[in-house]
Amino acid sequence: MKIALVIADLGVGGSERVLSILANDWIKKGHSVNVILLVKGPSFFELDPRIQVTELGFKTHLGLFSRLVSILKISLIFRKYIKRTKPDFILSFMNKYNIFVLLSLFKTKNKIYVSERDSPTEKLPKVTVFLRDSLYKFAEGVICQTKMSKDFIISHTKNKNVIAIPNPVSDFILDESIERENIILNVGRLVEKKGQKYLIEAFSKIENKEWKLYIGGDGHLKEKLINYVNQLGLRERIVFLGHQKDITYWYQKAKIFAFPSILEGFPNALAEAMTYGMACVSFDCFTGPSDIIEDGVNGYLVEERNVNELADRLNYLIKNQNKQLEFSKNATKLRNVLNKEKISDKYFNFCNSHL
């Protein structure tokens, strides 16, 4: 099969990670894979050298008129490129780029599948919502991350060929030399919807002062969050790790994973933490965490933005090692459910079913 995968770039992000997993798996299975990047830039994810990477060179940070001209130019280049290369199917990621692909290839006979990554509650620009709802019906199929997202897309776009496929987890590599310490870990971009401020506030209520909080990730809120930590007098107990090329070390070093996100498509970091046997506590935001956590069985779900409840659950886990171990044992069952080869096959079978 000749497959084209489309995304803006391969920078840090959940969509970029999933695309790289699919591309690497499909090339190993003998398919021809072309990753088409709309923007030229550095890659955070490694691709098999046999994968063709095509950069279309869209320029960011332009004025409105120049941006529109650039989008039109890249759209025409993309349309000609697809006509010339003739992939068996095209799979694009993220609603903005799904819209770009569907518009660019309108009235062609290409088999286009789109992967919807946002939560139904994500506030999007009105023009994006209009174009998504108008154009998704022309896609051969839509891949969502959760059942709730699937139901939302069907009702809003009228495309009936919609499936919910969870995100895969990366290869599980256990280093038995790493010993767990009294660390609560959080991983995510430092942006409003990831909710680190709620976690920092909850951590200020932790009774056992020997525990530390480590936060992995970067983003525009970093300075504000650091200032907030200083205001609370927690500078010695909260560590900002920044971007980590290999976050799996920390999944094995920390004992508890806290996930205070208030808006999720599918929580990759939470899923990976669970596969590494971490005892997890998460806000029960509209979609995502409840798809993988069974409250009280393999983790705790707490009311969104409820700092006191989050602190209570963290304090309880800190005091109860048996509950930590119970959650750890049950959470590792996700390794099989979210195995990357299995998820990759689900993506491929869906995209291949109508050819």
Image (cartoon, helix red, strand yellow):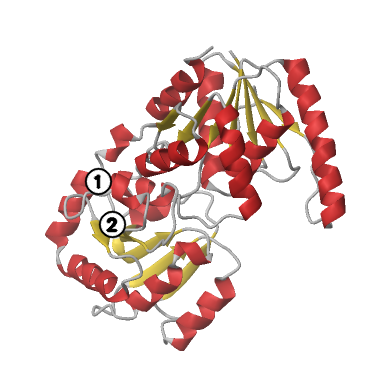
- In the rendered structure, find residue 175 and report the number of the disc placed on it: none
User: In which quadrant is the N terminus drawn?
Assistant: top right
Which image quadrant for residue 5?
top right
Compare residues 45 and 14 and report the one nearer the observer.
Answer: 14
Q: How far from the left and from the top, in percent, is residue 183? A: 33, 66
Name above or below for residue 322 compared with residue 266: below
Residue shown at 77% from the left, 26% from the top: 79
Q: Taking 222 as reference, is 296 left or right?
A: left
Q: Residues within 10 Å of mark 1 (few under 14, many from 20)?
A: many
Q: Earlier in the sequence, mark 1 or mark 2?
A: 2
Name above or below for residue 202 compared with residue 279: below
Q: Secondary structure at mark 1?
A: helix
Q: How far from the left and from the top, in percent, is residue 334? A: 29, 39
Residue shown at 44% from the left, 19% from the top: 349
Q: How far from the left and from the top, in percent, is residue 147? A: 35, 39
Instruction: For marks 1 and 2, give the CA distance.
Output: 9 Å
Q: Residues within 10 Å of mark 2 (few under 14, many from 20)?
A: many
Res 45 visible = no
Q: Secondary structure at mark 2?
A: strand
Residue shown at 28% from the left, 69% from the top: 310
Name above or below for residue 253 compared with residue 272: below
Name above or below for residue 99 compared with residue 284: above
Number of labels in the image equals 2
Residue receiving disc 2: 280
Q: How far from the left and from the top, in percent, is residue 196? A: 44, 68
- In the rendered structure, find residue 331 and report the number of the disc placed on it: 1
Which image quadrant for residue 4?
top right
Query: CB of mark 1 within 8 Å of CB of mark 2?
Result: yes
Amino acid at pointer 2:
Cys
Q: Taking 166 as reference, is 355 left or right?
A: right
Res 50 visible = yes
Amino acid at pointer 1:
Ala
